[in-house]
Image (cartoon, rainbow, N blue to C red):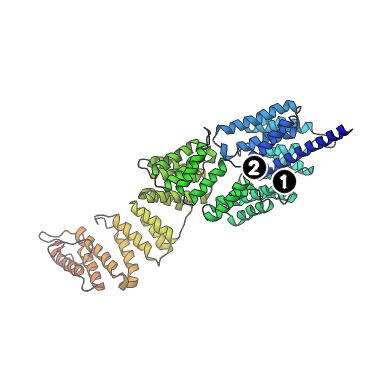
């Protein structure tokens, strides 16, 4: 009897240990410590191989781990999926085809694109758990697992309609959990941003069941972050931490937000993230990222090399992007370009952002001979970002990169595309756009922009000046006269303050003197312009000389009654003081 008593006590202790370990593993999983949860469930399965729940969750953890950035472009991603398959295949025997394991196998079918096979396994699992009171729906735990399976993968993975139906049935049976509602929200989001409201409501239902369910707060924050609403998403990330101070993903989201804004505040969140997350290459990477943000470029490079040395042949593309950014700041453009190319070649395509393409394009522009590559990558940058704000930011970045290289055609091209995508009628934008067009020798375009500037801000001088400058430049030998109307428009504006603008007014009339006197021999108009100079400054030598010459030629040609294009007679020329008049006084 005493022996039996001690045996029972030992059994209760073992069961308690199992329950405690399982509970801790679930908490680690929810807190974002996937690797720790994996070790716990591996131990649980080893001790109790016939436990369907232990096997199911071990397979799920392998599948979750395969989605982490650690393995985004690594052979480990497929290895982890195969480990999940091995767990479920073995468990089909050890658990006698438990319905939960059937759902796990169907989950793998979905990831493999075998939707019909997955649906058959899901239906089989539902049927196996149906009872007399509930022949149609099955066990809520099975329904919840089906929802979880359909929440995984990209937007093309799974059957959203079927999963939403199962979630509704689970809720009707009072079997819905915070985790199930969170997965339902993810399914809605996979259908596109227009489903953000439905997703948010699903996350809120998770919080209705458990106000301390941090993943749901974090997910709502992610929705608001996608909408560029920091006031809202920062609040929800803080709520996630308030609900669970050990929830690592929220600390990482806050670090990433502040890393470009307040490096000291970012460091505080990074410290919390490292303290609560799995200790792996990701935590090391984000510390190296912080060193870069803090301007410690060589230290960041050194940390990256430590990460790379520990990879043991595994791929971790992000380290090359880290190198590229640091080398760029260290003015080693070739190393920056080469490392960014490595990153782009090895990273999973779905993880390459518009900013990555933009940085790659900028890197190409800094190394002579790579302009064509830069343009190709630049177009990918635009294609990869569906938001107007994102595309505008990329175009601005590319324009700045071209400007830094003194390539004004490239600068104007991207500024013009940005203006077309999202018109900006600020005086500042008009100025830079017209200036870039002028420097790119796109004089007609520069005048068009300047005309818009004048129409929007008629009392500001910059628009008139920019239009005048490009009009003058478009007629380099002053032979067409196309700039004359623009010169007159600018002069009319300058005449509002003749004392302040005296020099530029005289210059404009001098331009006309040269055109009419030398280029088209319209001497009366030349005289008119010369008199305009003298009206502003009676002592101006150029004006006096131009007037004298115009009067001499009018008398010599007899063309004093109006404009004309008569050539000067033999022995008469549009010169003064023994030399040809310059185009400007």
The residue beneath circle 1 is: 178
Residue drawn where x is 66% and y is 29% of the image = 85
> In the current view of this chain or complex, which residue is farthest to the right?
1
Q: Is residue 5 left or right of residue 560?
A: right
Eyeballing the image, is 33 above or below 263?
Answer: above
Residue 395 coordinates in the image, percent (x, y):
45, 49
Q: What is the C-alpha distance between the residues marked 1 and 2?
A: 18 Å
Query: x, y percentage for residue 189?
Result: 63, 44
Badge 2, how many Cα within 10 Å: few under 14, some, many 20+?
A: many
* Residue 369 image offset from top left, x and y in percent: 35, 40
Determine whether the residue tagged by mark 2 lies in a helix, strand or loop: loop
Q: Are marks 1 and 2 in contact (CB under 8 Å)?
A: no
Given the current orientation, which residue lies at the most extreme left position? 571
Vertical comparison of 527 with 193: above or below: below
Tag 2 or tag 1, which sits nearer the N-term?
Answer: 2
Q: Nearer the viewer, residue 477 or 428?
A: 428
Identify the residue shown where x is 78% and y is 36%.
14
The circle drawn on residue 1 is: none
Q: Residue at x 58, y 55 (%)?
A: 230
Q: Position of residue 477 (x, y in %)?
A: 24, 55
- The residue nearer to you, when weighing 334 against 127, is 334
Res 190 seen here: yes
What residue would you read off at disc 2?
33
């Amino acid at each position: 009897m005493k022996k039996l008593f001690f045996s029972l006590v030992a059994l209760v202790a073992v069961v308690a240990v199992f329950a405690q370990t399982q509970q801790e593993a679930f908490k680690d999983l929810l807190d974002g410590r996937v690797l720790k949860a994996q070790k716990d469930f591996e131990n649980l399965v080893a001790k109790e191989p016939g436990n369907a729940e232990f096997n199911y969750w071990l397979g799920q953890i392998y599948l979750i781990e395969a989605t982490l950035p650690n393995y985004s472009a690594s052979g480990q991603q497929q290895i982890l999926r195969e480990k999940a398959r091995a767990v479920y295949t073995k468990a089909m025997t050890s658990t006698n085809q438990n319905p939960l394991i059937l759902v796990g196998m169907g989950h793998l079918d979905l990831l493999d694109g075998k939707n019909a096979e997955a649906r058959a396994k899901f239906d089989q699992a539902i049927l196996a758990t149906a009872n007399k009171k509930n022949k149609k729906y099955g066990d809520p735990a099975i329904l919840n697992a089906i929802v979880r399976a359909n929440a995984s993968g990209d937007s093309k993975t799974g059957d959203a309609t079927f999963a939403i139906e199962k979630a509704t049935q689970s809720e009707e049976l009072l079997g819905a959990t915070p985790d199930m509602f969170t997965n339902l929200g993810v399914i809605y989001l996979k259908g596109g941003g227009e489903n953000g409201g439905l997703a948010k409501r699903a996350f809120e239902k998770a919080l209705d069941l458990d106000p301390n369910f941090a993943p749901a707060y974090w997910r709502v924050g992610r929705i608001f972050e996608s909408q560029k609403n920091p006031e809202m998403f920062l609040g929800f990330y803080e709520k996630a931490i308030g609900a669970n101070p050990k929830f690592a993903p929220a600390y990482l989201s806050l670090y990433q937000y502040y890393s470009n804004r307040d490096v000291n505040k970012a460091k505080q969140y990074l410290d919390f993230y490292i303290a609560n997350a799995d200790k792996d290459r990701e935590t090391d990477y984000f510390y190296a990222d912080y060193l870069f943000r803090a301007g410690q470029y060589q230290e960041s490079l050194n940390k990256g090399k430590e990460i790379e040395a520990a990879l043991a042949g595994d791929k971790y593309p992000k380290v090359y992007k880290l190198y590229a950014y640091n080398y760029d700041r260290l003015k080693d453009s070739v190393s920056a370009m080469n490392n960014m190319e490595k990153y782009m070649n090895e990273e999973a395509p779905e993880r390459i952002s518009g900013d990555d393409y933009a940085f790659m394009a900028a890197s190409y522009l800094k190394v002579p001979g790579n302009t064509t590559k830069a343009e190709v990558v630049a177009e990918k940058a635009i294609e990869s970002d569906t938001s107007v704000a994102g595309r505008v930011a990329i175009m601005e970045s590319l324009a700045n990169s071209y400007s830094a290289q003194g390539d004004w055609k490239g600068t104007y091209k991207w500024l013009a595309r940005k203006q077309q995508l999202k018109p900006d009628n600020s005086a500042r934008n008009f100025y830079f756009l017209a200036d870039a067009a002028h420097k790119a020798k796109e004089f007609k375009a520069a005048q068009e922009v300047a005309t818009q500037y004048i129409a929007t801000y008629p009392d500001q001088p910059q628009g008139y000046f920019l239009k005048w400058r490009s009009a003058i430049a478009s007629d380099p030998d002053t032979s067409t006269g196309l700039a004359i109307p623009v010169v007159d428009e600018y002069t009319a504006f300058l005449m509002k303050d003749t004392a302040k603008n005296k020099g530029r007014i005289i210059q404009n009339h001098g331009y006309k003197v040269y055109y009419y006197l030398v280029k088209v021999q319209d001497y009366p108009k030349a005289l008119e312009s010369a008199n305009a100079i003298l009206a502003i400054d009676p002592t101006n030598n150029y004006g006096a000389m131009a007037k004298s010459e115009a009067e001499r030629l009018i008398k010599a040609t007899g063309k004093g009654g109006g404009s004309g294009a008569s050539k000067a007679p033999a022995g008469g020329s549009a010169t003064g003081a023994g030399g040809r008049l310059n185009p400007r006084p």
